[in-house]
Image (cartoon, rainbow, N blue to C red):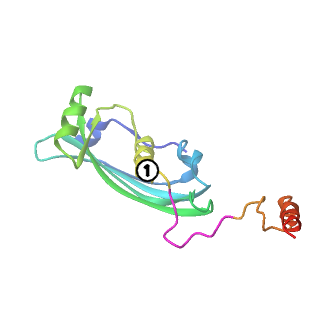
């Protein structure tokens, strides 16, 4: 499937809108960190001009994916919702200046071939927690194959020997 590529300035000038629903399996980097390729993201990109006449883009991402809980190593459905505004800038030097002044708006270099899917994937990756975990008291203790209390474990023999030594 081919995803939208837009000229960022023309897109903003025309107040254009693009919307798509994207399965997790379509994101090249995201599929490398998910537990399974289930899930879907609704993405919209809107062009507009701010009150100062600067060309801007508004990205909305909403969906879920299944990642691995870092506490119990079981699947965890992770909801991601994000709204981000970008002001388009011509030079890299302007990226830093704008970012220092305004907290709620990001700057983005003008791009004649802006990959909407790539921009959305960047936003999803930024919104992911560093170590996703289930809520408090929601995880079960992981069962390891080498668990000493497991009767089928090779280590269960050691526990029998340890008990015999104590007699």
Total labels drawn:
1
Quadrant occupied by the N terminus: top right
Which residue of the protein is positioned furthest toward the front in this rendering? 167
Residue 158 colored magenta? no
- 16 or 82: nearer the viewer: 82
Give the residue displayed 33% in from the left and 32% down from the top: 111
Q: Is residue 41 above or below residue 88?
A: below
Instruction: Tell me if residue 60 can be seen.
Output: yes
Quadrant occupied by the C terminus: bottom right
- 59 or 33: nearer the viewer: 33
- 33 or 27: nearer the viewer: 33
Kindly report the secondary structure that dominates the magenta region of the rendered protein: loop
The x, y position of residue 36, in whole percent, is 62, 56
| 85 sits to left or right of 118 | left
The x, y position of residue 51, in whole percent, is 11, 47
The x, y position of residue 39, in whole percent, is 55, 59
Q: Residues within 10 Å of mark 1 (few under 14, many from 20)?
A: some
| 27 sits to left or right of 43 | right
Which residue, given by chain and number where applicable, does mark 1 sit on? Answer: 124
Callout 1: SS: helix
The x, y position of residue 34, in whole percent, is 58, 52
Which residue of the protein is positioned furthest toward the bottom in this rendering? 137
**The residue stretch that appears in magenta:** 132-142
Which residue of the protein is positioned furthest toward the left in this rendering? 52
Residue 134 colored magenta? yes
Give the residue displayed 38% in from the left and 32% down from the top: 113
Instruction: Tell me if residue 14 can be seen.
Output: no
Give the residue displayed 63% in from the left and 62% down from the top: 74
């Amino acid at each position: 499937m081919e995803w939208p590529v837009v000229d960022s300035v023309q897109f903003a000038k025309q107040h254009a809108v693009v919307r798509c629903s994207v399965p997790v399996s379509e994101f090249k980097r995201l599929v490398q960190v998910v537990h399974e390729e289930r899930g879907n993201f609704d993405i919209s990109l809107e062009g507009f001009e701010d009150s100062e006449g600067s060309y801007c883009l508004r990205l909305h991402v909403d969906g879920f994916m299944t990642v691995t809980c870092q506490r119990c190593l079981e699947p965890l459905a992770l909801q991601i919702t994000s709204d981000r505004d970008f002001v388009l800038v011509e030079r890299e030097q302007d990226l830093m200046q704008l970012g220092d002044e305004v907290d709620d708006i990001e700057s983005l270099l003008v791009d004649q071939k802006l990959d909407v899917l790539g921009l959305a994937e960047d936003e999803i990756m930024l919104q992911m927690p560093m170590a996703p975990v289930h809520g408090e008291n929601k995880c079960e203790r992981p069962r390891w194959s080498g668990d000493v209390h497991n009767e089928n474990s090779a280590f269960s023999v050691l526990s029998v020997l340890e008990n015999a030594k104590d007699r």
